[in-house]
Image (tube, grey):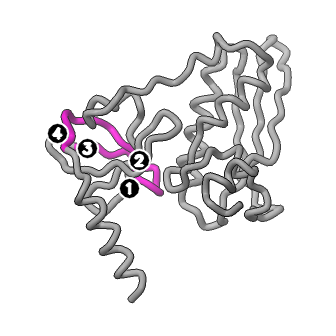
């Protein structure tokens, strides 16, 4: 009964701030990662605008819209930063990109959430690099795994000197709140 009441409250909150989609655009269904198309004229509510993406509530579902399609929502078009213009090592660039990856349901980046356990950059024979990331999810059954893995791989491949990217989802050790940075704990109101 409590869940039903919470769902009704959530729907009425979203209805208060509905906006109309200005043009057709691609979105990613949360948590399955399936590609869907938002139709022009659809009514949506913005729930989060982080990590160069918008999370919107539409027809009882959450979907993620790329920041470059912000104009379809009547909002600012967000561009990914040019990581190749950034100073620093490949490790620095990987970390900077990981800090732009957000769980669509939690307004904290995956680094501050403590989801990234390990990040290794290995030199390849052709003077390119391979990036291997070991990460976890806040819960083993979290359906966001494929969506986050895909986003991480896509972003890391933007680095010029990176040829291969491998993201391994691991659940040992299990994630817990103590793995979050103090910044994350402050953002979520638990510090």
Q: Which residues are magenta?
A: 20-38
Instruction: Give the structural element (helix, strand or loop) at label 2.
Output: strand
- Which mark, residue 55? 2
Alpha carbon of mark 4 to alpha carbon of mark 1: how far? 17 Å
Q: Earlier in the sequence, mark 3 or mark 2?
A: 3
The reply to whether the magenta stretch includes residue 28 is yes
**Labels 2 and 1 touching (C-beta < 8 A):** yes
Alpha carbon of mark 2 to alpha carbon of mark 1: how far? 7 Å
Q: Earlier in the sequence, mark 1 or mark 3?
A: 3
Instruction: Give the structural element (helix, strand or loop) at label 4.
Output: loop
Q: Is residue 145 left or right of residue 167?
A: left
Position above or below: 103 against 132: below
Alpha carbon of mark 3 to alpha carbon of mark 2: how far? 12 Å
Residue at label 3?
38
Instruction: Give the structural element (helix, strand or loop) at label 3.
Output: strand
Alpha carbon of mark 4 to alpha carbon of mark 2: how far? 17 Å
Instruction: Give the structural element (helix, strand or loop) at label 1.
Output: strand
């Amino acid at each position: 009964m409590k869940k039903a009441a919470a769902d009704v409250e959530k729907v009425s909150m979203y209805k208060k701030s509905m906006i109309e989609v200005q043009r057709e655009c691609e979105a990613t269904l949360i948590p399955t990662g399936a590609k869907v198309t938002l139709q022009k004229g659809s009514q949506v509510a913005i729930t989060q605008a982080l990590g160069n993406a918008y999370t919107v509530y539409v027809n009882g579902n959450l979907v993620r819209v790329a920041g470059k399609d912000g104009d379809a929502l009547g909002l600012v078009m967000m561009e990914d930063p040019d990581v190749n213009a950034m100073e620093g090592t490949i490790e620095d660039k990987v970390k900077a990109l990981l800090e732009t990856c957000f769980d669509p349901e939690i307004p904290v980046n995956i680094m501050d959430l403590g989801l990234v356990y390990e990040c290794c950059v290995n030199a390849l024979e052709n003077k390119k690099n391979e990036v291997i990331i070991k990460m976890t999810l806040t819960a083993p059954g979290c359906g966001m795994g494929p969506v986050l893995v895909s986003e991480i791989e896509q972003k890391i491949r933007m680095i010029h000197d990176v040829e291969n990217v491998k993201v391994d989802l691991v659940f040992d050790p299990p994630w817990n709140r103590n793995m979050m940075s103090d910044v994350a704990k402050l953002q979520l109101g638990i510090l």
